[in-house]
Amino acid sequence: MTMKAMNGETTVPDERAALTAAACLFHGFSDPSRLAIVRHLALGEHRVVDLTDHLGLAQSTVSKHLACLKDCGLVTSRPEGRASMWSLNHTDTVMELLSAAERLLAETGDAVTLCPNFGVATSVVAS
């Protein structure tokens, strides 16, 4: 959305805020474990114990990533007995985004994993 400022220049209101929000959203998807949790929750509600069993992740890891996803507004939970049932918010939109990402990855080939800034080699060095 563009607007004309009083001096005649074209401006984009809140462009910086919109870009920051988009970067924050993509950061929410930036961990492979979070992506695995999101994909699994797209199948339906799960308890943390179900996610740990299905994904082979530690309970603390799953809980930490669910908290992050909840803070981003991507998942929600509801109590069921002594457990919580976790579900994906905006399932169709999230799955459309992940499908678009898969198409883009198919087009870029190995470029993303070979990227010197964010590729696989940088995560090995950072570990």
Image: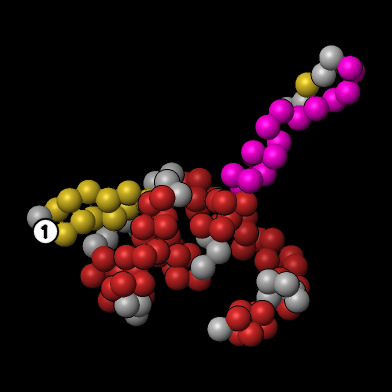
Say above or below: 107 vs 124.
above
Say above or below: 73 vs 104.
above
Closer to us: 91 or 72: 72
How many numbered marks, from 0 up?
A: 1
| Residue located 76% across and 30% down the image | 12
Question: Can see residue 92?
Answer: yes
Say above or below: 74 vs 37.
above
Taking the magenta stretch, the answer to whether it contains residue 59 is: no
| Residue located 62% across and 59% down the image | 101
Instruction: Return the x and y of residue 43 as percentages of the image width and height.
Output: 36, 59
| Residue located 30% across and 69% down the image | 51
Residue where numbered disc 1 is placed: 82
Magenta stretch? 7-22
| Residue located 61% across and 85% down the image | 124
Give the amino acid type for the residue marked by disc 1 in the picture: Arg
Instruction: Return the x and y of residue 5 as percentages of the image width and height.
Output: 82, 19
Crowding at label 1, few (<14), some or many (≥20) Cα neighbours within 10 Å? few
Taking the magenta stretch, the answer to whether it contains residue 10 is: yes
